[in-house]
């Protein structure tokens, strides 16, 4: 019963704070409509980019392929050096490619592509037909393909699998939580944290743990809601407030944090790994 009453109070507070601070045009529904409008334009642009990329990939026009790679994949040696490597060492020869429908949202893109491919080192083997699930992202305003598996795992799921309106509600709670952390308002931080976690951790211990770090300037990069779980990737400055490290400047970090929906209200899941600007070993070494 106490959890239900707290949920009603928090929903009212979150809605009132959003309305008083931002106005009607910044409602979750209005923000989602803006995102969806931008996504339509992005999907149209990405469809053309992906078409050009796959025409180049099948014909092995390496200069064009190179133009669609992320900066850290392109490297500093220029496209000629990369093309020389790709012509000899890239794992697959793509004989055909049929790009499918595109989804885009918040500067990320997803596309299914039916391909016919051979292994470059064993061209005598029979070609295989398979479906790729390509991921794209905007890098300095241009679309680049994300092919590294670990990098793809850092991206949100495609929009058709997500609760997009709920993502706007999480955005509001995330702003409240990070304002509370920056202001060191541990009462508000505690109130917006997962009720199940609060049953396992004493209020005093919660403050003790979270008082060790200063958090500043959180900026969401993406928000993903699937069911009653949410992930938020954000850029943030973190400062370890251990006395031996007080002279250090806040350190930039990119973190993924979790949120949960409980009885209709979103809460920060603080029982996930606590982000630290320095490890325990670093603190011990500085003492």
Image: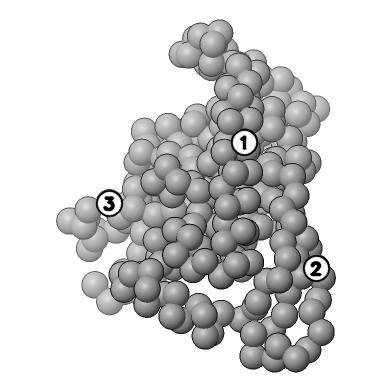
Instruction: Please report the residue visible at 39 percent of the width from the left and 61 percent of the height from the top.
Output: 71
Say which residue label 2 marks. 130
Can residue 142 be seen here? yes
Density class for disc 2 (Cα within 10 Å; few <14, some 14-19, many ≥20) is few
Q: Position of residue 171 (x, y in %)?
A: 56, 32
- Tag 2, which secondary structure? strand
Q: In 3D space, how far apart are the residues under numbered discs 3 and 1 (Cα atoms)?
A: 40 Å
Q: Is residue 159 left or right of residue 105?
A: right
Task: Give the label on residue 250, or none.
Answer: 3
Instruction: Please report the residue visible at 56 percent of the width from the left and 8 percent of the height from the top.
Output: 24
Q: Quadrant of residue 253?
A: bottom left
Between 152 and 45, the one lying in front of the other is 45
Looking at the rendered image, the quarter that the N terminus falls into is: top right
Say which residue label 1 marks. 44
Looking at the rendered image, the quarter that the C terminus falls into is: bottom left
Question: Which callout, 2 or 3, points to the residue nearer the camera?
Answer: 2
First-in-chain label (2 vs 3):
2
Task: Confirm or deny contact between disc 3 and disc 1 (CB under 8 A).
Answer: no
First-in-chain label (3 vs 1):
1
Between 14 and 2, the one lying in front of the other is 14
First-in-chain label (1 vs 2):
1
Density class for disc 1 (Cα within 10 Å; few <14, some 14-19, many ≥20) is few
Question: Which callout, 3 or 1, points to the residue nearer the camera?
Answer: 1
Q: Position of residue 241 (x, y in %)?
A: 30, 53
Q: Is residue 77 left or right of residue 107?
A: left
- Tag 3, which secondary structure? loop
Can residue 194 be seen here? no
């Amino acid at each position: 019963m106490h959890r239900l009453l707290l949920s009603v109070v928090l929903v009212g507070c979150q809605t009132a704070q959003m309305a008083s601070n931002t106005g009607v045009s910044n409602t979750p529904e209005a923000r989602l409509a803006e995102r969806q409008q931008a996504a339509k334009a992005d999907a149209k642009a990405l469809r053309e980019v992906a078409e050009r990329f796959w025409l180049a990939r099948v014909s092995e026009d390496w200069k064009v392929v190179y133009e669609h790679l992320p900066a850290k994949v392109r490297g500093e040696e220029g496209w000629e050096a990369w093309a020389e490597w790709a012509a000899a060492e890239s794992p697959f020869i793509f004989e055909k490619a049929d790009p499918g429908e595109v989804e885009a949202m918040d500067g990320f893109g997803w596309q299914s592509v039916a391909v016919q491919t051979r292994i470059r080192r064993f061209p005598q083997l029979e070609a295989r037909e398979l479906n790729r699930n390509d991921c794209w992202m905007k890098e300095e305003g241009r679309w680049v393909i994300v092919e590294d598996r670990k990098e793809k795992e850092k991206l949100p799921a495609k929009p058709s699998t997500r609760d997009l309106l709920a993502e706007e509600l999480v955005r509001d709670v995330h702003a409240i939580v990070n304002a509370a952390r920056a202001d060191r308002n541990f009462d508000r931080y505690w109130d917006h944290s997962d009720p199940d976690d609060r049953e396992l951790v004493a209020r005093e211990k919660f403050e003790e743990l979270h008082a060790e770090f200063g958090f500043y300037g959180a900026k969401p990069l993406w928000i993903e809601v699937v069911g009653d779980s949410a992930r938020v990737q954000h850029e943030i400055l973190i400062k370890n407030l251990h006395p031996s490290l007080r002279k250090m400047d806040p350190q930039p970090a990119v973190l993924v944090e979790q949120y949960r929906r409980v009885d209709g209200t979103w809460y920060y899941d603080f029982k996930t790994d606590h982000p630290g600007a320095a490890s325990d070993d670093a603190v011990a070494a500085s003492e």
